[in-house]
Image: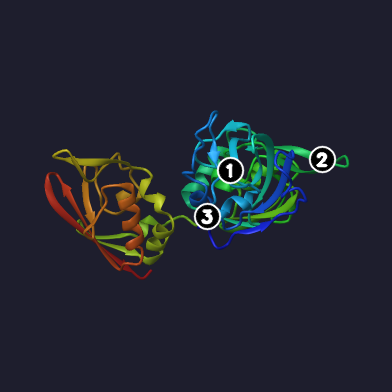
Amino acid sequence: MLHATWLLLLWTSVANAAPGSGVINLEVDIAGLDRWSAWRHLPQAADEPGGIAVDGDPKWAKLGLKQGDVIRTENGHPVSDDLSLGEGVVLLEVERAHKPMIVRLMLRGDAKEDVKLTADEFVDLVAHTNRGPMSTAVRANGQPSGVRIVDDLLFIRARLHVGDIVRTIDGTPIVTDSQFTAALQALRIGSTDIAVDRDGRRVTVSMVREANVELAAIRKRSDSAIDVPTSVRDALRSDFLMFTRKVRIVPAVTNGKIHGVKLLEIEPGSLYDALGLRNDDTILDVDGRSIDSIRDAIDTHTALEKADKITVHLVRRGKPFAIVYSVIAN
């Protein structure tokens, strides 16, 4: 079933035209759409050259398709069993009643996007912007009007797409790449609004830069008893990936089975260092919850994100050991 927040605008007079009528144009609002589950593991056509077989599921009507259609290509590439419904224009080559046709989709997301940047993610963003031009200047009516994003990796941290035209950052016009890069590198703690024109529509990207996590505030009462301030607990709760940084984590294998993880290459001043963990420690469980896989680790993180006391069972230098973490007020 599709997510309840499907909101669609269909504005073409040819959407219900006869088979093989040429081009179908659809504008589709994908804001809030759970497209990753709706458009994965799709049925396959048995006849050459293959493709995605459109069955009787009502979701296909949202894309202007009918039962019996076969999707051959997506943006010129043969389809697998997934459709990539990101923002922007998507062209589907479709066979309907043995006649070729094109479905042109204009996929639109939210008019406002909130992007959170942890301290480490901000450092990554700054490092990336130092590697070369992120954008190119554009003009309108002979006057500087903004910068067009040309770096496809900006989407990872800043949710800016190739082709986006940045107009202003916090109300200040941006008309050169150097201005754009300097503004990203100087993002203040808190929220910064970036006004962007995306596929003919104004979109606001709100970048929220978080303050550094004060790991020095973690207090070690003994090797087995450590106090963690609520501010640090909340930061860890909102940024699961902090547990993957400045350390190398490998599965721990006993008698051919994975049980726990071993910590290697812990960097001084890192999260694991502050939490009293050491190189070659093998963490077996957290409050009795398994961490034998990534899925286990995520589930454990979610289950314990509001806990006031957590016990980590591990093996240190070949002997069982436990560390009790108590969450205390700042």
Question: As shown in the figure, which amino acid type bears the numbered disc 2?
Answer: Arg
**Mark closer to the chain start, 3 or 2:** 3
Q: How many marks?
A: 3
* Label 2: element kind: strand
For marks 2 and 1, give the CA distance. 46 Å
For marks 3 and 2, give the CA distance. 37 Å
Mark 1, Cα crowd under 10 Å, few <14 / some 14-19 / many 20+, is some
Furthest toward the bottom, the residue is 329
- Residue wearing tag 2: 139
Would you say residue 178 is visible in this rendering?
no
Q: Is residue 316 left or right of residue 54?
A: left
- Tell whether label 1 touches label 3 (CB within 8 Å): no
Q: Is residue 287 left or right of residue 194?
A: left
> Residue 281, how many percent across, how many down?
21, 45
Question: As shown in the figure, which amino acid type bears the numbered disc 1?
Answer: Gly
Image quarter where the C terminus lies is: bottom left
For marks 3 and 1, give the CA distance. 24 Å
Q: Measured along the vertical axis of the image, is residue 232 above or below residue 294?
A: below
> Residue 317, how many percent across, how many down?
14, 44
Q: Which mark is residue 68?
A: 1
- Residue wearing tag 3: 34
> Nearer the observer, disc 2 or disc 1?
1
**Mark closer to the chain start, 2 or 1:** 1
> Residue 70, how many percent across, how many down?
58, 39
Furthest toward the front, the residue is 97
Furthest toward the left, the residue is 319
Question: As shown in the figure, which amino acid type bears the numbered disc 3?
Answer: Asp
Q: Measured along the vertical axis of the image, is residue 187 above or below residue 219?
A: above
